């Protein structure tokens, strides 16, 4: 895999050489309640081995488009057609989604790494120079995305420091292109 920008979001400088037998010694420590909790940095390093695509989740709220880079995204159900996205309770996008009750998941191409970096910054997101349209819900659909689903929020479930937004797909589409990949805290692409 060819790697691009190294992000601050996950520090993957260290490579894990632990066997499964060694992991509990390294990763588990007593949490504030005195119970055993798994170390969050270890969780990031370990789960960083799960290669994902990269999306920008968008919505429209208070007459403004909002967007957030997200890879905690999954196809949840075919009948009914549901997807889920996990959003930090502290992210601005969390409140926007609860208010707007809709979102679009825009799956990025390998040419859109800069867009991913742009939408991963804290603070208001700038849509200037980005071509987008609306489909069924009014959420921004990025013209150059590899694929998109446009969804109505059907449920919000608590998931620790994140909320899980479940959306029913009401529109979607895809085009030819190569996906942007995220692996080990770095951007990459598929070699073939
Ligand atoms: C590759 C990548 C994937 C990310 N995935 C998620 C995610 O699934 N959920 C999430 O809440 N934040 C995720 N983030 C972090 C958010 O993009 C970032 O915290 C957010 O844009 C900050 O905006 P805000 O604090 O102004 O709301 C991801 C960041 C990157 C670089």
Image (cartoon, rainbow, N blue to C red):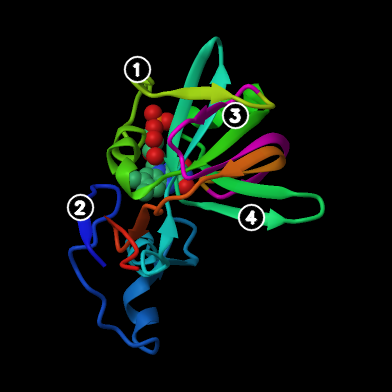
The x, y position of residue 12, in whole percent, is 24, 62
**Magenta stretch prevailing secondary structure:** strand
Q: Which of the marked residues, 1 or 2, is nearer the chain's N terminus? A: 2
Local packing at callout 3 (Cα closer than 10 Å; few below 14, some 14-19, many 20+) is many
Local packing at callout 1 (Cα closer than 10 Å; few below 14, some 14-19, many 20+) is few
Q: Residue at x 30, y 63 (%)?
A: 184
Magenta stretch bounds: 138-160
**Which mark is nearer the camera, 1 or 4?**
1
**Which mark is nearer the camera, 1 or 3?**
1
Q: Residue at x 47, y 49 (%)?
A: 176
Q: Which residue is mark 3?
A: 97
> Real-space Cα distance between discs 2 and 4?
27 Å
Q: Determine whether, in the image, residue 175 is placed left or right of residue 189.
A: right
Q: Residue at x 40, y 64 (%)?
A: 51
Q: Which of the marked residues, 1 or 3, is nearer the chain's N terminus? A: 3
Q: Which residue is mark 2?
A: 6
Local packing at callout 2 (Cα closer than 10 Å; few below 14, some 14-19, many 20+) is some
Q: Determine whether, in the image, residue 2 is placed left or right of residue 106.
A: left
Q: Which residue is mark 1?
A: 128
């Amino acid at each position: 895999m060819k790697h691009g920008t190294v992000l601050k979001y996950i520090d993957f400088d260290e490579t894990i050489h632990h066997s499964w037998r060694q992991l509990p010694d390294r990763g588990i420590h007593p949490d504030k309640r005195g119970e055993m909790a798994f170390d969050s940095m270890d969780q990031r390093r370990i789960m960083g081995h799960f290669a994902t695509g990269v999306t920008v989740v968008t919505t429209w709220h208070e007459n403004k488009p909002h967007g957030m880079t997200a890879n905690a995204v999954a196809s949840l159900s075919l009948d009914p057609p549901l997807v889920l996205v996990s959003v930090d309770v502290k992210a601005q996008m969390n409140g926007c989604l609860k208010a707007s009750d809709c979102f679009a998941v825009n799956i990025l191409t390998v040419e859109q790494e800069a867009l991913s970096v742009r939408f991963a910054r804290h603070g208001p997101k700038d849509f200037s120079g980005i071509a987008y349209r609306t489909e069924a819900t009014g959420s921004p659909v990025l013209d150059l995305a590899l694929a998109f689903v446009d969804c109505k929020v059907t449920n919000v479930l608590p998931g620790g420091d994140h909320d899980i937004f479940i959306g029913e797909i009401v529109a979607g589409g895809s085009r030819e292109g190569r996906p942007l990949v995220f692996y080990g805290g770095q951007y990459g692409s598929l070699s073939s």
